[in-house]
Amino acid sequence: MAEAQVKNAALLAVLCLASAASWNYLVRTSQIDPAPISLLPSPPMRDGIYAPNEKLEKAEKIGLGLVHGPEDFALDREKKSLFTGCEDGWIKRVWFDEGRVENWTFVGGRPLGVAVGKNEELIVCELRRGLLNVTKDNVEVLCNEAGGSKLKMPDGVDVSKDGVIYFTDASYKYSPAKFELEVFEYRPHGRLIKFDPTTKTATVLLKDLYFSNGVALSAQEDFLVFCETFIFRCRKYWLKGEKSGKIETFLENLPGFPDNVRVDAEGTFWIGLLGRRTLLWDLTVKYPAFRHVLVRMWSIINPYVLFKKGAILNLNENGEPIAFFESKRPLITGGVRLGNHLYFGGILDHSLNSLELP
Ligand SMILES: *[C@@H]1O[C@H](CO)[C@@H](O)[C@H](O)[C@H]1NC(C)=O
Ligand SMILES: *[C@@H]1O[C@H](CO)[C@@H](O)[C@H](O)[C@H]1NC(C)=O
């Protein structure tokens, strides 16, 4: 009897030592230096405005099989079509009247944020080359560095009526191939940048942002809103008036991961959410050590485990939620509203989606 107990105790001790050693090895060889982060408790998501729904499932698919992983959307000036950047490096133009998909311009790489410029050119954030000026027959790099650091993850963009470009770089530290390191390190490597096409200069407006993603000017262009995806927050940056240059909260503690943001003709904001905030993610944030494991396992993690149910959230100018449209699938990145239609999509989609609004 006693002998068996000794054996068990020895076995337990060996197991403990082995797991301590492997944990130590995991942390010591980890590629990240994860920051402790504290988030506000998640907002109520069982009832109220964020109650689960599948409203986006009623959408009609346009150009199925021709629009792969549409990430962001920009309406043309006449509102007859929209542009979107796809995972195959194409900018596709979708015409609303006949639902025709035009292979507009091949930019290569991974086009993310898109916005129509002053001369009807398309300004594109492309992950590898930076900020691009794209026309039907030309692609030109406008900028690939700011404030002395190269753009590593140019992500969201908007253009003012007088042609000034505002865009984000989600990280000056990690390139897209190291996306998971950026996400799980949880340190502020993001920037908001202004590019003036007349002087061709880039100015860093804000730094130390947490994965700065989508950006959109308000209808009056007196402020802009930018999203910080992995801390569930959107903030306002004032461009005009007495608060010019100041930052304010637009909406924090979102029900999911905000990606792109767009403004409609009435001045309301439409934000794509990659997925619902989950308990698993909250634990990830709370326990930095857990993130070493996730980084190690990243290549085998199915996105459906971490991201569930993408959505589009509509907010008024004061950042108050008006409507919440959820999907069954994750990784919805954004949408634009035109009249009584919401056009949206995400990186797992193979079409543009069109939802008739009530
Ligand atoms: C447009 O691109 C798609 C792939 O995204 C391809 O299947 C299709 O043949 C192209 N159409 C034309 C007219 O080149
Ligand atoms: C983009 O290129 C077009 C055509 O070359 C030009 O008219 C336009 O001014 C350029 N836009 C910017 C922001 O440089």
Image: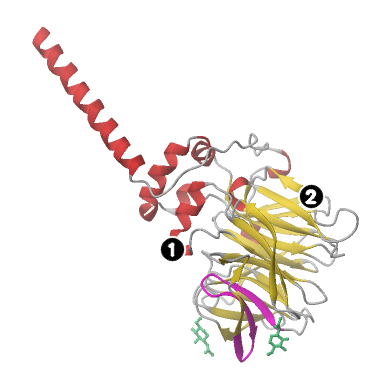
Where is residue 345, by image quadrant?
Answer: bottom right
The numbered mark, 1 or 2, whose residue comes first in the sequence reads 1
Location of residue 240 in the rendering, given as x and y in whole percent from the top left corner: 87, 61
| Residue at the spot of label 2 | 319
Q: Amino acid at mark 1?
A: Ala
Res 241 visible: yes
Res 261 visible: no
Secondary structure of the residue carrying numbered label 2 = loop
Q: Is residue 229 left or right of residue 87?
A: right
Q: Is residue 156 above or below residue 42?
A: below
Q: How crowded is the residue under tag 1: few (<14 C-alpha within 10 Å), some, or many (20+)? A: few
Main SS category, magenta section: strand
Q: Residue at x 85, y 63 (%)?
A: 266
* Quarter of the C terminus within the rendering: bottom right
Q: Is residue 287 above or below residue 310?
A: above
Q: Amino acid at mark 2?
A: Gly
Q: Residue at x 47, y 58 (%)?
A: 179
Location of residue 337 in the rendering, given as x and y in whole percent from the top left corner: 75, 66
Q: Is residue 121 left or right of residue 301?
A: right
| Number of marks present in the image shown | 2
For this orientation, the residue located farthest to the top is 2
- Chain part drawn in magenta: 121-139
Location of residue 10 in the rendering, given as x and y in whole percent from the top left corner: 16, 19
| Residue at the spot of label 1 | 177
Residue 272 in the magenta stretch? The answer is no
